[in-house]
Amino acid sequence: QVQLVESGGGLVQPGGSLRLSCAASTIIFKFLAMGWYRQAPGKQRELVADITSAGSTNYADSVKGRFTISRDNAKNTLYLQMNKMKPEDTAVYYCKVIGVNGMSSWGQGTQVTVSS
C-alpha cells in the first residue's frame, strides 16, 4: 500500500497562489497516473488535474490556465501549483495514484480555503 502525504494547503486571498505537494512512500515513475482531486462541502469529489507516466496532463475546465500539475521523480513528489485562485477553489484537496496493477491509493487530504 502506497502512503501519500499531502501538504501546502491553507488560507489564501482571492487572486493568490498556493503550491500543494504530495509525497509518496515509494518511487513514482512506475505509476500509471497521478492526480489531484478536490471535494467541497456538500459536493462530490472531482478531478482537478492528472498526469500520466508519459507526462501527459489533463485539467478540469474550471482550473485550466490557472493550475499546473507536475512531478519530481527524484523526490517521489507530485505538485499542484495554483494561481489566480478563486473562492470556488475552496475544498479539501486529495492526491491519488494508480499503480501498474490498476489499484488506486489516496492521501488524507489538505484543506484549501480562498477567502478575503
Image (tube, rainbow, N blue to C red):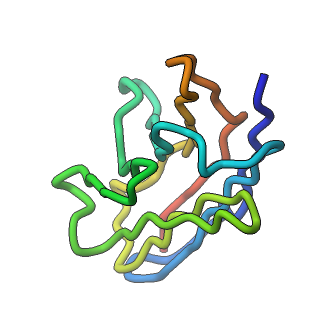
Q: How many marks?
A: 0
x then y, percent, for residue 77: 69, 59
Tell me: residue 93, above or below residue 18. above
Quarter of the picture containing the N terminus is top right
Tell me: residue 63, above or below residue 41. below
Q: Kindly indicate the quadrant of the structure image that contains residue 103.
A: top right
> Residue at coordinates 37% horizontally, 61% vertically from top-left?
87
> Residue at coordinates 73% horizontally, 68% vertically from top-left?
74
- Of 61 and 16, nearer the camera is 61
> Residue at coordinates 30% horizontally, 73% vertically from top-left?
66
Tell me: residue 93, above or below residue 67. above
Tell me: residue 68, above or below residue 36. below
- Of 42 and 76, nearer the camera is 76
x then y, percent, for residue 93: 55, 45
| 54 sits left or right of 19 in the view | left
- Of 34 and 99, nearer the camera is 99
x then y, percent, for residue 11: 62, 67
> Residue at coordinates 73% horizontally, 57% vertically from top-left?
76
| 4 sits left or right of 50 in the view | right
x then y, percent, for residue 52: 40, 48
Q: Kindly indicate the quadrant of the structure image that contains residue 92.
A: top right
| The furthest residue to the left | 61
